[in-house]
Image (cartoon, rainbow, N blue to C red):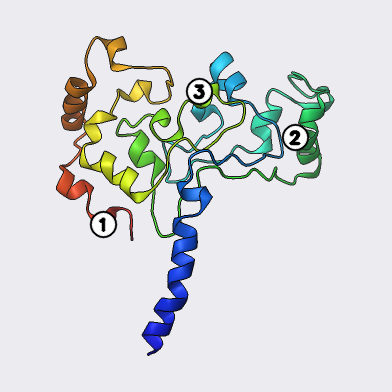
């Protein structure tokens, strides 16, 4: 009886989280406290993703950049490089630097709490940022480019070779296998062996993502 009541109470929560726009809806595009353009910083200036998301290849969580990352180039008060330092768009950055309060960035790709995702495990096995995040180098405002659903993840886990790339190309948004004179099929099979990626039976085991 108690178990039935618990299940009835848990199911709506599971459905809300599992089908939230933050986890499944392509196009989810929250407004950010600072109008940061990835199209400018990544696309035009060629900044590497790891310049701001410093833990993406070292930890499960891709760090949200601290204010210091912004003031390295946009320092207020002439303390360092002052690119567009007087821009009104940078006022939240200057306020954060002055008060010590972090900028309240809004997560765009927010995995459901019942699913475990390790950024480093994917990046260090040759999964490019573009595979999950889309062409952020063309986005003035970042949006969710893929569903992030379980079915979408499993499709890749059944055959990772279709998305693998050399490690030095992981953050290169525009790279294609043809740039290295090969096909994705040939490259993917080679890299699966090189990176010691196991077969689909292991890769689709429930415990990998649900712990």
Q: Relative to 18, is 173 above or below?
A: above
Say what secondary structure mark 3 lies in.
loop
N-terminal-most mark, 2 or 3 = 3
Q: Relative to 176, is 16 above or below?
A: below
Q: Relative to 150, is 44 above or below?
A: above
Tell which tag, 1 or 3, sits nearer the viewer.
1
Say what secondary structure mark 2 lies in.
helix
- For disc 1, the neighbor class at 10 Å (few under 14, some 14 to 19, many from 20) is few
N-terminal-most mark, 1 or 3 = 3
Residue at left offset 77%, top offset 30%: 90
Q: Relative to 64, is 176 above or below?
A: above
Residue at left offset 42%, top offset 17%: 174
Say what secondary structure mark 1 lies in.
helix
In the rendered image, residue 112, in percent from the top left (x then y), is placed at: 45, 55
Residue at left offset 40%, top offset 77%: 7
- For disc 2, the neighbor class at 10 Å (few under 14, some 14 to 19, many from 20) is many
Indicate which disc residue 93 carries: 2
Q: CA distance from mark 1 to mark 3?
A: 33 Å
Mark 1 lies on residue: 206
The residue closer to the viewer here, 19 or 211, is 19
Mark 3 lies on residue: 48
Tell which tag, 1 or 2, sits nearer the viewer.
1
- For disc 3, the neighbor class at 10 Å (few under 14, some 14 to 19, many from 20) is some
In the rendered image, residue 57, in percent from the top left (x then y), is placed at: 41, 35
Q: How many marks?
A: 3
In the rendered image, residue 100, in percent from the top left (x then y), is placed at: 75, 44
Residue 45 visible in the shown view: no
Q: Are the two marked residues, 1 and 2, in contact with CB atoms closer than 8 angstroms?
A: no
């Amino acid at each position: 009886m108690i178990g039935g009541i618990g299940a009835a109470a848990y199911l709506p929560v599971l459905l809300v989280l599992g089908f939230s726009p933050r986890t499944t809806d392509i196009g989810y595009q929250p407004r950010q406290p600072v109008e940061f353009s990835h199209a400018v910083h990544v696309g035009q200036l060629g900044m590497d993703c790891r310049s701001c998301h410093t833990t993406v290849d070292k930890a499960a969580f891709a760090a949200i950049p601290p204010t210091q990352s912004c003031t390295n180039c946009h320092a207020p008060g002439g303390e360092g490089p002052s690119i567009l330092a007087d821009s009104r768009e940078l006022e939240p950055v200057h306020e954060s630097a002055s008060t010590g309060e972090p900028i309240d960035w809004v997560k765009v790709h927010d995995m459901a709490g019942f699913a475990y995702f390790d950024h480093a495990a994917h990046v260090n096995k040759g999964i490019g940022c573009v595979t999950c995040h889309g062409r952020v180098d063309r986005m003035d405002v970042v949006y969710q480019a893929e569903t992030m659903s379980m079915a979408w993840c499993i499709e890749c886990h059944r055959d990772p070779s279709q998305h693998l790339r050399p490690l030095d190309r992981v953050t290169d948004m525009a790279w294609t296998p043809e740039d290295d004179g090969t096909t994705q099929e040939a490259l993917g099979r080679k890299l699966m062996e090189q990176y010691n990626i196991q077969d689909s039976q292991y890769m689709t085991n429930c415990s990998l993502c649900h712990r």
